[in-house]
Amino acid sequence: MNLEWYDWIGMAGTLMVLGAFFLLQAGRLHGNGLVFQLLNLFGAAGILVSLWSNFNISVFLLESAWVAVSLYGIWRSLSKPDRKPAG
């Protein structure tokens, strides 16, 4: 097996997405947290890069949607007004 640079980036992206999901299930991350969203964003982007030599429309659509949803989640997280506790 001869892996190219884009294969390694795709594998790293896959590990990021799976790692984020595992940490969410283990209760170590929150689904609306910035770290979770960034792991998903960079993971999906890495998988998109891996399509460099072998394009697959299904994977492209899935990962493009994953990037878009992650960007939306990051935007929502960053645009929330800071709430101070009452009292």
Image (cartoon, rainbow, N blue to C red):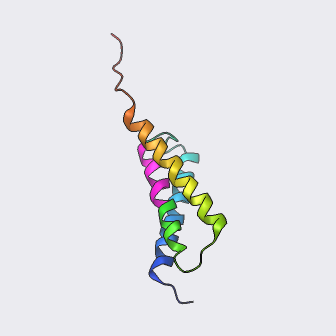
- 71 is higher (above) or lower (below) than 16: above
Q: Residue at x 39, y 30 (%)?
A: 80
Res 76 quadrant in image: top left
Image x and y of residue 19, in percent: 52, 57
Residue at horizontal 47 percent and vertical 55 percent from the top: 41
Q: Which residues are magenta?
A: 34-43
Q: Front-most of 8 and 69?
A: 69
Image spot of residue 28 (x, y percent): 49, 45
Q: Is residue 40 above or below residue 10?
A: above
- Residue 77 lies, in percent from the top left, at 42, 37
Q: How many marks?
A: 0
Q: Residue furthest bottom?
A: 2
Is residue 35 found inside the magenta-colored segment of the image? Answer: yes
Counting from the top left corner in percent of width and height, residue 18 is at 56, 59
Residue at image point 47% right, 77% down: 6
Q: Residue furthest top?
A: 87
Please report the residue visible at 49 percent of the width from the left and 65 percent of the height from the top.
13
Q: Quadrant of the N terminus?
A: bottom right
Asked if residue 2 lies in the magenta stretch, the reply is no
Q: Main secondary structure of the magenta part?
A: helix
Which of 62/17 is in front?
62
Residue extending farthest to the right is: 58
**Which quarter of the rendering shows the C terminus?**
top left
| Direction from residue 1 to residue 36 in the image, left or right | left
